[in-house]
Amino acid sequence: MGVVIVHMVPCSGPEALQSTADNLCRMIERIGGQRDGVFCVDCETYFNTSMGRTQHVLHDSEHPASVFSLLESGLCLVADANFDSLMNKLTPQLFTTKMGTKVECKGPRYQVEDFVLKVGTVTIGTSARGLLVECEYQPCPVTASCWELMRELMESLLGVPLNQPGPYLALRMREIYTPVDTIQQYMEHFNVLRKSNPVQAVSAPASGQSGGQTNQNAQTPTSKG
């Protein structure tokens, strides 16, 4: 896989959220994006009743054979699909979950030359909470080597500047990118959205601010070298 950045697009409510998502999809198609199915990233949170600690279990449709377990310490463990069965067996004896707290980001997936773009609506239970855009540049495994190219595309789509990657990715710009880095970025955004109300405007983390308007003149950046 290549490098992925996940960006939150603030919206003022469910109607603005849907219209913004539709506009982004049209923009991606306008620059040559080919629809390539759908994607989903979900998160179920468990509470360890004996230790008083929280554990997040995430799935990413890009890696269907893996389950990601994110601990309070920030450590992310990667297991196979049998991990879900194990968690089910340990619930409710050791772990508990709250009804209606599962987070899911789902939407269309597009291929644009060397990029994969995804526009995902985030729901918590049955409530729509936000909109995330994922951008992957497939040829490059190091964020620092392709950040400017990815930023050019994202700024072109969103119509606003992206000053830097999110907090997690900013500390790992020169490291080899792995699927765990994508999971950590989604978790950053899920934590923000869990604290928001279904209809309140949500501000993006430090990766830059963007409003509900998209740039109608977006272009696919050209790789240099």
Image (cartoon, rainbow, N blue to C red):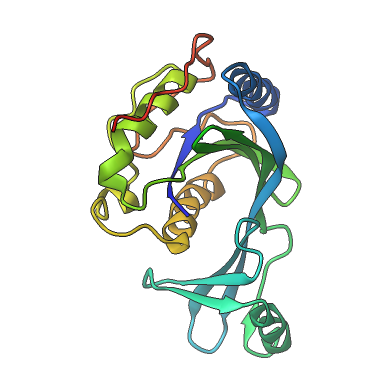
Q: Along the horizontal axis of the image, is 207 left or right of 56? A: left
Image spot of residue 213 (x, y percent): 53, 15
Quadrant location of residue 207? Answer: top left
User: Is the residue 142 above or below the residue 165 in the image?
Assistant: below
User: Is the residue 41 above or below the residue 154 in the image?
Assistant: below
Please name whichever residue, 26 or 111, is drawn nearer the observer in this view of the structure. 111
- Mark yes or no: residue 133 visible: no
Q: Residue at x 66, y 58 (%)?
A: 101
Q: Residue at x 33, y 53 (%)?
A: 168
- Mark yes or no: residue 98 visible: yes
Q: Along the horizontal axis of the image, is 9 left or right of 63? A: left
Q: How many marks?
A: 0
Quadrant location of residue 34? Answer: top right
Please name whichever residue, 83 or 94, is drawn nearer the observer in this view of the structure. 83
Image spot of residue 20 (x, y percent): 62, 22
Quadrant location of residue 64? Answer: bottom right
User: Among all residues in the image, which is located at the extreme front?
Assistant: 225
Please name whichever residue, 13 or 86, is drawn nearer the observer in this view of the structure. 86
User: Among all residues in the image, which is located at the extreme right?
Assistant: 126
Please name whichever residue, 40 or 201, is drawn nearer the observer in this view of the structure. 40
Image spot of residue 169 (x, y percent): 33, 50
User: Is the residue 23 above or below the residue 186 in the image?
Assistant: above
Q: Residue at x 27, y 58 (%)?
A: 175
Image spot of residue 161 (x, y percent): 34, 22
